[in-house]
Image (tube, rainbow, N blue to C red):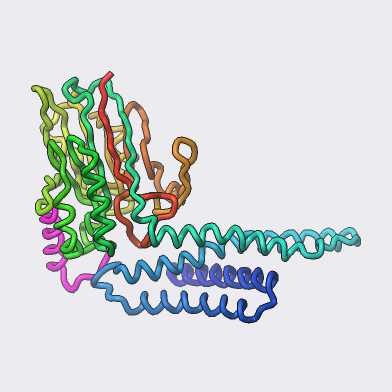
Amino acid sequence: MKTAISLIILFVIIVLLEVYAFQAIKTITKSKVIRYSWLFVSIAVYANFAYVALTYDRTQGQTPQFQMAMGILLTVLIPKLVVLIFMFGEDIYRWILKLISAVTSGNTTPLAGRRKFISQIGLGLAAIPFVSFIYGIVQGKYNYKVLKYQLTFKDLPEAFDGFTITQISDIHSGSFTNKEKIQYGVDLINEQKSDIMLFTGDIVNNKADEMDNWIAVFDKLEAKEGKYSILGNHDYGDYMDWDNPQDKIDNFQKVKDIHQKIGFDLLLDEHRYLEKDGQKIALLGVENWGKGFNKAGDLQRAAAGIQKEDFKILMSHDPSHWEEKVKQDPFNYQLTLSGHTHGLQMGIEIPGWFKWSPSKYAYKQWAGLYKEAGRVINVNRGFGYHAFPGRVGIWPEITVIELKKY
């Protein structure tokens, strides 16, 4: 029943988008060629998405073909939402004037040409997300950004003053299509020359074999003091149909084996001590724990044998774990590294001033650094992409953190 209601609501929204967008086109041009070309393109986009959605092999999870169909659909729909806002707002204005006219018996007719002017503004502004989405699909998903932070902690051992960490997250290798661009991203990671490298989950979309063509690229990742990793929610194979339960079990083992193939020490509710000059810090990694998702992670198990006074770095894929469990834990996890959100791969960021994405309405911590009660979490925006085959305003991220003592 809920599914049917959701589909009806979605259908109504799409109809409204198309009606108002077509009205805007009709208002600014009398050319039937332009009008019917607009309709033809819209129908073609919907037909393409419906065909791909109904015919793609669900045993393969989300394929690049499905993601591209989704990307084209969003590229067409989001700009029409802008047009809808302007045109519907104009209708409300007209209705108010008519109501006032009926009550006062006065003449409150809108200015001639106003609707054409509003249509021009709506279509002009709609061009911004249209061009942005095209750029995001073609180039934005490879627009890697190195974000550098210096974090200061009073209880950091002196030997680790200046210790550097490169964090990457959410590779999602099943979405990749361009080896040259991915190699560029890997080379950029290596250029940071950090002491350790930490990968915070989602190496595939669903299946281990998605990584087959990329192992030779990612096994070149380098870090002076080692590479460590954890699992993300997509690594469990929960988002696709399996022929039988054993296939899912076997795939999960193969996903875990990938980490060793590319030189990472996979932490499954475990910890390692990093030592320098007789001093040490604890590095912990938990399996995925997410509010509303798989809650496999066991923080207490990972911390078994660690002392409360130890300086701790925790890798936990989903930032909701920090919000729900970690930040108030009396054991004191000074630094947590997460990913998962991708910043929804679309939004607006002006460094140091403004940051917005629809992702913020689902996650309190959704991109970048957050500090609370003397504890810090960094939510990496992700190296790869998923569902939408691009990035708009929220670019793929390589995080470099320098630890400092004060």
Q: In screen coordinates, is 330 left or right of 71?
A: left
Q: x%, y% of residue 23? A: 66, 71
Image x and y of residue 133, in percent: 46, 60
- 113 lies above or below 313: below
Q: Does the rendering let one see residue 366?
A: yes
Magenta extent: 238-259
Residue visible at 25% across and 21% down? 405
On the image, the x and y values in percent for residue 284 come to 18, 38
In percent of the image, x 16 and y 71: which residue is there? 244
**Which residue is depicted at the point 11% across and 32% down?**
305
Residue 231 image point, x, y percent = 20, 50
Determine whether, in the image, residue 111 is placed left or right of residue 185.
right
- The picture quadrant where one finds residue 21 is bottom right
Q: Main secondary structure of the magenta part?
A: helix
Quadrant of the image containing the N terminus: bottom left
Residue found at x 26% / y 52% = 184
- Which residue lies most toward the top here? 406
